[in-house]
Image: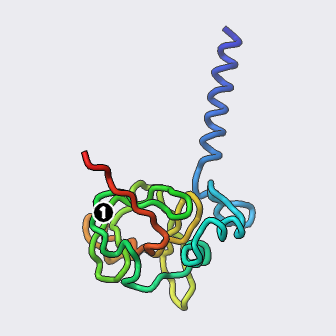
Amino acid sequence: MKTQSISTVALVFLVGVSLLSCAQDTKNSSGLTVFPVTKTEDEWKKQLTPEQYYVLRQKGTERAFTGVYAANHDSGTYYCAACHHALFDSKTKFESGTGWPSFYKAITSNAVLVESDNSMGMVRDEVVCNNCGGHLGHVFNDGPKPTGLRYCMNSVSLKFEKTPKK
């Protein structure tokens, strides 16, 4: 009986530790967010194309109307191009007229992380992958109902996979 209780307590403890280690949006002692997927800059450079590296790791932006997903109307899921973390469902994509793929909602409440971006002489809300920290784009409060949000994403930061036909 005692052995079983200790085993149960140990199991609960291990599950709790496991959940904590997978928790997203954790900060290190410097106040920087630590993501579950971390790589050196050299590893990212080897994995990503130069344009993907520029946008995802250096917080760049692709030119409007040049991305492959701006006019994509297929059903499916958009994943992070760096770590394959699910980000957006095509059902939430809409035509914003901006030249970048736009969504009114992330696929889950913890798919992306919104951080303050004070670059370019303005304050914006930057959207990053909550799994690897890759820069995806920005979110604005001028989107359609039901959320009123416009997640304006760089196509190069995304990988689209069609929903299989039944």
Q: In front: 110, or 87? A: 87
Task: Point out the residue furthest to the right here.
Answer: 29
How crowded pointer 1 is (Cα within 10 Å; few <14, some 14-19, many 20+) is rated as some
Q: In front: 126, or 99? A: 99
x and y percentages locating residue 64 in the rendered image: 40, 85
x and y percentages locating residue 31 in the rendered image: 69, 66
SS at mark 1?
helix
Q: In front: 31, or 99? A: 99
Query: At 34% from the left edge and 75% from the top edge, which residue is drawn?
Result: 70
Q: Is residue 147 above or below residue 58?
A: above
* Camera sees residue 45: yes
Residue 139: image quadrant is bottom left
Task: Point out the residue furthest to the bottom here.
Answer: 121
Where's the N terminus, which quadrant? top right
Residue 155: image quadrant is bottom left
Query: At 61% from the left edge and 77% from the top edge, which residue is drawn?
Result: 58
Q: Is residue 97 above or below residue 133?
A: below
Position of 137 compared to 16: left or right? left
Color style of the picture: rainbow
Where's the C terminus, which quadrant? top left
Query: At 45% from the left edge and 56% from the top edge, which residue is drawn?
Result: 86
Q: In front: 143, or 164? A: 164
Residue 30: image quadrant is bottom right
* Camera sees residue 150: no
Question: Which residue in the structure is indicated by mark 1?
Answer: 92
x and y percentages locating residue 3 in the rendered image: 70, 12
Task: Point out the residue furthest to the top here.
Answer: 1
- At label 1, the amino acid type is Thr
Query: At 40% from the left edge and 82% from the top edge, which residue is drawn?
Result: 66
x and y percentages locating residue 12 in the rendered image: 62, 29
